[in-house]
Amino acid sequence: MSGAQSQVVIVAGAGPAGMAVAAALSKVGHEVIILNRDIKFGGLAEYGIFPSKLKLRGGLKKQYWELLQQKNVHYLGNVTIGNGKDLTVEEVRGMGASAVVFTIGAQGTKAIGVEGDSAQGVFHAKDVVYHFNRLPGFGDRPFDMGKHVAVIGAGDVMVDIAHWLIRYKQVKRVTAIVRRGPVERKYNPKEIRSICANMDLEGINAEFARITDRLAKVGQNPDQVLKAFTDEFTKCEPKVSETKMGFRFLASPKRILVDGNNRVRGLEMEDNRLDPKGEDTVAVGLKEYYEFPCDSVVFAVGDKVDETVGLPYRNGVFTTNPNKTGNDPDDALFQAYDESTGKVMEGVFLAGWARKASEGLVGVAKRDGDWCAEVVERYLEAKAGGEGVNAVLERLLTRLKQRQSRPVDVNGLRALAVAESAFSGKTDCIGEFKFSANQDMLKHIV
Ligand SMILES: Cc1cc2nc3c(=O)[nH]c(=O)nc-3n(C[C@H](O)[C@H](O)[C@H](O)COP(=O)(O)OP(=O)(O)OC[C@H]3O[C@@H](n4cnc5c(N)ncnc54)[C@H](O)[C@@H]3O)c2cc1C
């Protein structure tokens, strides 16, 4: 270890970012206590990444299990931090650890902010993703999607939702609603393989014909754009349903239209044009409106952090130190900062999607965790040694007992893994079997 002695660090959140912080700090000899809201570790690697991506998920799981075998890594799942939860932020800070790193992801939902957004049949993408990944609280909730689903967005999450709707829900039609044009699509072309066998090519050609003039006006060649767009429909996974997948470009939902039972019947859409902006484009509303019929709407437009946790927050993000230190990586980027006092929160750090909501894939979150760990190490080197890990753990467990919380340690996770494997292949879960309620998991954890 480069620092003087081993110190205790609490990492809140066991997703890819938190596990990277824990791996890096434990590797250099520090004691790491991981507190995680979910019983299971992994965050969105467990409850976000599409459940049939067994190779990716399996690889991450293996890596995380190995980390949890380390003697200086201590795991407590089923522990939520926040006001009125198992522990408050201040309580965690007061447990005697030398530093606390929050890697709790982006758990807030962006307000949709269009009239009618509370109608039945309007969903946030994250809730849908949590549902088909069987996150407790979401797995058993009904998600009545109807026959025609409009998914707002053009990123990988839109594709994942369409994947579920096409291959598992087998709805009649899915339409991706995209504010700008096909050139500005954001999804990874490889991801489209899961749904490209169901592309409604006739509909896509008609849609390109509808917007051809608007593409040409910003110097985009409509024929070339169409070719590049459809050329990506290769190596498609075999078709399993008759669902038709289409796109509606240059369209912004302005209002959700409902029937007499407050159930979605369509969207009021505004047509957009594209204007050049530097190397990029922006969508500009044309004030021309039309009705777009659909039975449900999923907003896949990114997330924000959960402002109720109790960390300093502004405009969808937890605030970090605006005063750069000049180090590489810069400490300021990872230091929680209270704008009301104008001070860094001593010993409190942020990483992953808790620092930059909805930013990048697992590799990006991991790298953020690695950088944050470097910053924390620097902080620990300059700090006198704190308390021993047993004292911190005992304090934590005493407080959790007082709260009648039920933390789950690594032995509990092992018992759960054995119980779940006994069900494998016996249910209609996508991918591996998972219990979808905490009570069911806890029954198998002694
Ligand atoms: C739908 C979807 C599909 C994706 N598919 C892919 C893919 O195929 N490939 C890929 O590489 N990346 C994918 N990603 C991106 C990847 O999942 C993220 O980059 C990564 O998980 C972010 O890691 P994180 O640790 O910052 O946050 P998260 O993964 O969100 O982890 C946060 C952790 O914090 C815990 N937590 C939350 N709140 C609290 C609290 N209050 N107290 C204590 N603990 C708390 C949670 O239990 C969770 O374990 C996908 C993301 C989404 C949304």
Image (spheres, grey):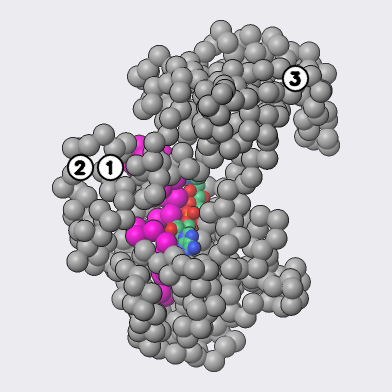
- Write down the region rendered in magenta: 32-55
Name the residue rendered at 78%, 13% in the picture. 213
Q: Looking at the picture, how far across and down is residue 177, in whole percent?
A: 62, 26
Name the residue rendered at 38%, 88% in the picture. 391
**Disc nearer the start of the sequence (3/2):** 3
- Quarter-wise, where is residue 176 in the image? top right
Of badges 3 and 2, nearer the viewer stands 3
Of badges 1 and 3, nearer the viewer stands 3
Q: Is mark 1 within 8 Å of ligand 1?
A: no
**Disc nearer the start of the sequence (1/3):** 3
Q: Looking at the picture, how far across and down is residue 61, in whole percent?
A: 34, 54
Q: Residues within 10 Å of mark 2 (few under 14, many from 20)?
A: some
SS under mark 2: loop
Q: Label 1 vs label 2: CA separation?
A: 6 Å
Q: Residues within 10 Å of mark 3 (few under 14, many from 20)?
A: some
Disc 1 and disc 2 in contact, CB within 8 angstroms: yes
Residue 432: assigned label = 1
Q: Quadrant of the C terminus?
A: bottom left
SS under mark 3: strand
Identify which amino acid the numbered label 2 is placed on: Ser
Note whether residue 70 is visible: yes
Residue 289: assigned label = 3
Residue 217: assigned label = none
In-front residue for pair 398/305: 398
- Which residue is label 2 attached to? 424
**Disc nearer the start of the sequence (1/2):** 2
Q: Looking at the picture, how far across and down is residue 225, in whole percent?
A: 67, 19
